[in-house]
Amino acid sequence: MRHRKTPFIFGFLVVPVVLYIFLVIWPYAQTFGYSLTDWPGAAPPRKFVGLDNYVALFKDSAFLSALQHNLLLLIVLPLVTILLALFFAFMLNVGGKSGTGGVQGVRGSAFYKVVFFFPQVLSVAILSMLFQGMYRTDKGGLLNGIVIALGLTDEQHPWDWTTNPTFGLWCVMGVLIWSSVGFYLVLFSAAMQSIPKDIYEAAMLDGAKRGTTFFKITLPLLWESIQTAWVYLAIVAMDAFALVSTMTPGSYYGGGPDHHSEIMATLLMRNFITFGKAGYACAMGVVIFFITLVLSVVSLRVSRREKIEF
């Protein structure tokens, strides 16, 4: 019987595996190969240059600046997003008053879940247009309207947001956090709903407060979901091309003269399309791939814990 199953399973796996090799593995291999050449992009590579592109890469101040910005995103985006999503998920599931109905979320929790999840149905283009209106660098922008109304500035001197070297990347980071919290709130809510309410009720009968139940019960039982969320958000932090390139003026072509909003993905596209340095851009892509791979593996290894069953 076992020998009969082998051809059957192999028959179902061979096509997906071939497609995966052809559509995923082969392009990665090609990218690595092109990174060792002086490929201009529009024509075949002229000559083999070895590791020259990689040596030049780590001497490029623009790339090092972009790498620092990605690392900042990598620290702030997962941390803030996960903390906010955990807080809201806890409040919507077990943060309400416990009475005859047992432990429950705040009133209207189902409605709040829909509201928080709403940014997930918006495309990146819509998000960009929406927040460009909020960040407008004149009195018509929402944020400038607020700071003018508060008397922090006047109509002749509105604040620059996305074009400001200090605010630019943080403005994009705020949009990424705002648009991501809802998804992970729903993810953590689904995980919390699988935790028996009896555990919370027993803890509260023993005198445990909300904070204690969160750190002693909710957090340990949600650890695998948090681990998954961290890896996915780390991948988002290493990319973020669409929002940065559309929201920060000039970022697609360099993030301004000081590269204040440059990330590795925008720098890659600028070198590939604008400067015709496709081989150099492929080297950046390889570096981004290995950084993301290493971060994912390290995150999974470091955050590994013994599975808690209930």
Image (cartoon, rainbow, N blue to C red):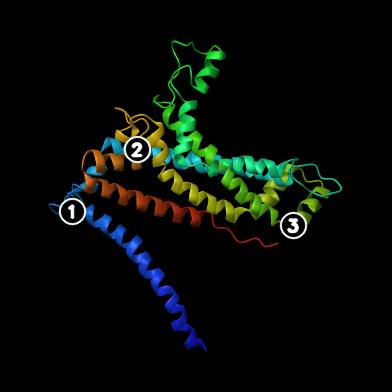
Residue 87 in sight here? no
Q: From the image, tell me which residue sits under label 2.
A: 66
Q: Indicate the position of residue 237 as horizontal and vertical percent values.
A: 44, 43
Name the residue at 48% across, 53% down: 299
Q: Nearer the viewer, mark 1 or mark 3?
A: 3
Residue 114 position (above or below residue 254): below
Name the residue at 62% across, 50% down: 188
Decide: few, some or many residues near mark 1? Use Cα within 10 Å; few <14, some 14-19, many ≥20: some
Q: Indicate the position of residue 165 as horizontal and vertical percent values.
A: 39, 26
Indicate the quadrant containing the C terminus: top left, top right, bottom left or bottom right. bottom right
Disc 1 is placed on an element classified as: loop
Q: From the image, tell me which residue sits under label 3.
A: 196
Residue at mark 3 to residue at mark 2: CA–CA distance? 46 Å
Name the residue at 67% across, 40% down: 112
Residue 56 in sight here? yes
Decide: few, some or many residues near mark 3? Use Cα within 10 Å; few <14, some 14-19, many ≥20: few
Q: Indicate the position of residue 35 as horizontal and vertical percent values.
A: 23, 52
Amino acid type, mark 2: Ala
* In-image side of 299 versus 264 (left or right): right
The answer to which quarter of the image holds residue 87 is top right
* In-image side of 60 versus 121 (left or right): left
Q: Which of marks 3 and 2 is nearer the N terminus?
A: 2
Disc 2 is placed on an element classified as: helix
Amino acid type, mark 3: Pro
